[in-house]
Amino acid sequence: MHIYTSPMCQEVVRLAGVSTYTVKKNNNFDGADLAIVLSETVTEVPAIKVKLNTFKQIFDSVDFISNHLGTEKLDMGDWESVYLSHIRPAKGKIDERKKIKVKVYSNFLKEIVADMGFTLVEDQADFMVYPDYLRKKISTEIEAAGDMAIEIPSHKNAPIDPLERAHMRYNILEKRLCTRL
């Protein structure tokens, strides 16, 4: 079976225990029996589509790929405890986190902010969170928010490994959003 994947999905494919696959940078999956790609990727071949924004999505994607292909997933080391370190404090302070209102300017960041237990709002936010690629487009809103505006790296400004990327983003949000707790 010829399995193709994109660079952004390569690590979850590896962690799912898939030993033979081809990484394609241009999303040209011609000749593949199966493509493993991000959920928004359009393909002409059968595909497993994954979401890799939150730690839970990453873990679920590794499990899904492994179960679907009948492979034995690899040990993910301490990544689960890294994830829990961001979420576990929310168990004891969930009511406090819910009080912090956050306006978010992208779907992938909404998933992360919601996963951390903060309240998503459209108006009267305590903070605004936006991806770096929107900096120029929403510069007026960023200026008005001042120190309450939080820029999150995306695409080429973030690690390609989804676990490292999630860790970086959660850390930024944890440090900035939890200043009010």
Image: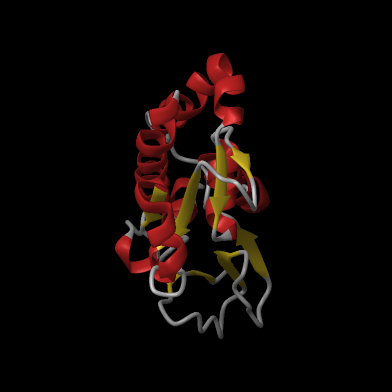
Q: Quarter of the image containing the C terminus?
A: top left
| Total residue callouts | 0
Q: Quarter of the image containing the N terminus?
A: bottom right
Q: How is the image coloured?
A: secondary structure
The residue closer to the viewer here, 128 or 155, is: 128
Q: Is residue 102 left or right of residue 149?
A: right
The residue closer to the viewer here, 10 or 116, is: 116
Q: Residue furthest front?
A: 144
* Residue 23 x/y as whole percent: 42, 71
Q: Is residue 16 above or below residue 21?
A: above
The residue closer to the viewer here, 154 or 26, is: 154
Residue at 38%, 64% in the rendered image: 132
* Residue 145 x/y as whole percent: 43, 53
Report whether residue 10 is seen.
Answer: no
Q: Is residue 22 above or below residue 15?
A: below
Q: Is residue 156 above or below residue 81?
A: below
Residue at 54%, 23% in the rendered image: 90
* Residue 166 x/y as whole percent: 42, 46
* Residue 134 x/y as whole percent: 44, 69
Residue at 64%, 47% in the rendered image: 121
The residue closer to the viewer here, 146 or 79, is: 146
Report whether residue 11 is seen.
Answer: yes
Q: Is residue 94 above or below residue 138?
A: above
Residue at 43%, 28% in the rendered image: 180
